């Protein structure tokens, strides 16, 4: 009993399997374990918040990327429309130039006919 008291004072005791156990530091160890578990839970919460934030940033980046792709595609389609309009206008200009050339030739021909007719009229008048 005296040996047991001496062991008890040193924070040691025998368990039900007659193994020597340390008792004194158990409460402190339990407290440290609880603190560790609390800190681990807090850390997990922080990591969870961080993951959530990173997910939000990734979604925002993806959204911005899609907007940029949409804007780029819109610009491409506008550029293609402009190109098509320009080609139509060039074709119209070419068509009008050809028409102008036809009218010029027709005008020259009519001027020649008018000159010939005036000459004929002058000759006809002078003959009388």
Image (tube, helix red, strand yellow):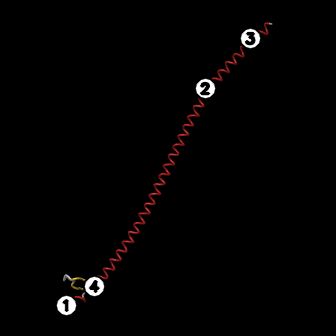
Residue with the mark numbered 2: 98
Q: Residue 54 has which mark?
A: none
Give the number of the mark in front: 4 or 3.
4
Mark 3 or mark 2: whose residue is earlier in sequence? 2
Residue with the mark numbered 3: 120
Give the number of the mark in front: 1 or 2.
1
Give the number of the mark in front: 3 or 2.
2
Helix, strand or loop at label 4? It is loop
In the rendered image, which quarter contains the N terminus?
A: bottom left
Residue at image position (25%, 86%) is 11
Mark 4 or mark 1: whose residue is earlier in sequence? 1
Mark 3 or mark 1: whose residue is earlier in sequence? 1
Q: Residue furthest top?
A: 127
Residue 12: x and y, percent?
23, 85
Residue at image position (41%, 63%) is 51
Residue with the mark numbered 1: 3
Density class for disc 2 (Cα within 10 Å; few <14, some 14-19, many ≥20) is few
Vertical arrangement, residue 119 with respect to residue 71, above or below: above
Helix, strand or loop at label 3? It is helix
Q: Residue 24 has which mark?
A: 4
**How far apart, in angstroms, are the residues tagged by discs 3 and 1?**
159 Å
């Amino acid at each position: 009993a005296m040996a047991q008291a001496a062991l008890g004072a040193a924070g040691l005791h025998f368990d039900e399997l007659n193994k020597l156990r340390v008792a004194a530091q158990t409460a402190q160890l339990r407290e440290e374990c609880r603190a560790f578990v609390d800190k681990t839970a807090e850390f997990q919460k922080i990591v969870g918040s961080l993951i959530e934030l990173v997910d939000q940033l990734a979604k925002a980046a993806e959204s911005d990327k899609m907007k940029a792709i949409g804007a780029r595609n819109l610009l491409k389609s506008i550029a293609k429309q402009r190109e098509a309009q320009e080609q139509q206008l060039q074709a119209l200009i070419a068509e009008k130039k050809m028409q102008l050339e036809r009218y010029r030739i027709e005008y020259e021909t009519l001027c020649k006919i008018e000159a010939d007719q005036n000459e004929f009229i002058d000759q006809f008048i002078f003959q009388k």
